[in-house]
Amino acid sequence: MKNIIVFIALLITGLPVYAQSYFSISGKIIDADTKLPMQGASVFAQNTTMGTATHADGSFTLQLPAGGYDIVVTFTGYQTETKRVSGADAGNNNWEIALHQKQNEMQDVVVKATYEVADGWEKYGDFFLENFIGKTDNSKQTTITNKEVLKFYYYKRKNKLKVLASAPLVIENKALGYSISYTLDSFIHEYNTQVSQYTGYPLFSEMVPANPEQQTNWNNARLVAYHGSILHFMRSLYHRQLKESGFEIQFLVNDGDKQNAIPVKDFYGALNFAKDDSTTLVSILPNQREVAVIYKEEMPAPLYLETNPDSNPKFELSVLLFAPMQTINIEQNGFYFNQDDFTISSYWGWEKMADMLPYDYQLPSEK
């Protein structure tokens, strides 16, 4: 999701500047069975730096920058709950979210014990890190500090690896200056197709710099990570600034055994771009399912070209494969849904957690 080539802050010139406004949401977390309030439940906007814990009466309040978010509620021993919000929910003080206790069925315990790999980290740890943290320059400075919570399961018949975590992963990204608490749902790798997928809920927090120089380095590294990322693309698409931001799109069409790239002149017409003025939500439904996104302002990272020698070295190419007739909705902060309705490959698919920025990331010109 982000870049590795060193960038100069002066390249901010020409980027759109958006005013930052906020809205608040409030509510109460209760036990689904007893209906009693739950103190200390974690409530956060996933993939942001914004979170809180509930008070003794189960209440919480979050102030969020304009845009959209998935609100995540977690409590040890309970199932995680999520709720989507946007600026249209501003001032909503009537939320009541009920958490259900996890049911540890004996059969599930036996199945997991059957397939668990005793020395899982030794066998699969490096593979997991490459496909979850990534193989970019930033990944070299990113570590999981509590790897002991990871459990590895191998299903021989399906030739599949599954990774679970008994507690949120603590990820330290010293390249970008973020500590991330990642509630991992699961990581699955299908060896037959060589496809890895993971789902979970990250909460970012900014590290405290040792000195002003380190903060400056982090700010520069975050700007580099932002340029050309899917976050940059979604924000630029929302504001109809694709060309100005250095993006162009093409449609990929299969012709027998050959795949042809068709240049698109009217980006927004080809994507069936529509904006609902009442909700400020943008929706797209591309005329073709497979969309190539080209970022022309940077060359691919040398590490990417090493493992993908057939890639064009002059620009970064990512591919979005949309599910048939599925509309994608985009909020002004770059949050998009439903994220399961398309898959990402090529450059954005190569970048993983080590290059991820939170949805509330602001450009230096916006602060």
Image (spheres, helix red, strand yellow):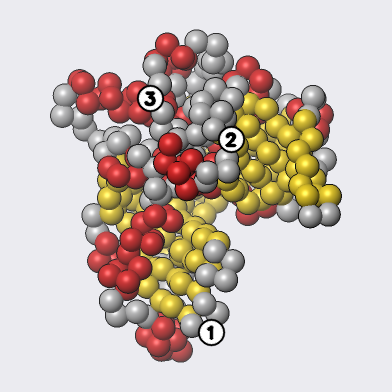
Q: Which mark is residue 6?
A: 3
Residue that carries the numbered disc 2 in the rendered image: 312
Residue 133, above or below 98: above
Quick check: 145 left or right of 83? left
Horizontal arrangement in the rendering, residue 251 relative to residue 352 (left or right): right
Amino acid beneath label 1: Arg
Which amino acid type corresponds to the residue marked 3 in the rendered image?
Val
Callout 2 secondary element = loop
Q: Quadrant of residue 285?
A: top right
Percent coordinates x, y for residue 151 in the rendering: 34, 71
Mark 1 to mark 2 CA distance (whole Å):
38 Å
Q: Identify the residue shown where x is 27% and y is 42%.
A: 141
Say whether marks 3 and 2 touch (CB < 8 Å).
Answer: no
- Mark 2 crowdedness (10 Å alpha carbons): few <14, some 14-19, many ≥20: few
Query: Which residue position holds label 1?
Result: 157
Q: Position of residue 106 (x, y in %)?
A: 42, 89
Name the residue at 79% across, 24% down.
265
Q: Amino acid at mark 2?
A: Asn
Alpha carbons under labels 3 and 2: distance apart: 19 Å
Q: Earlier in the sequence, mark 1 or mark 2?
A: 1
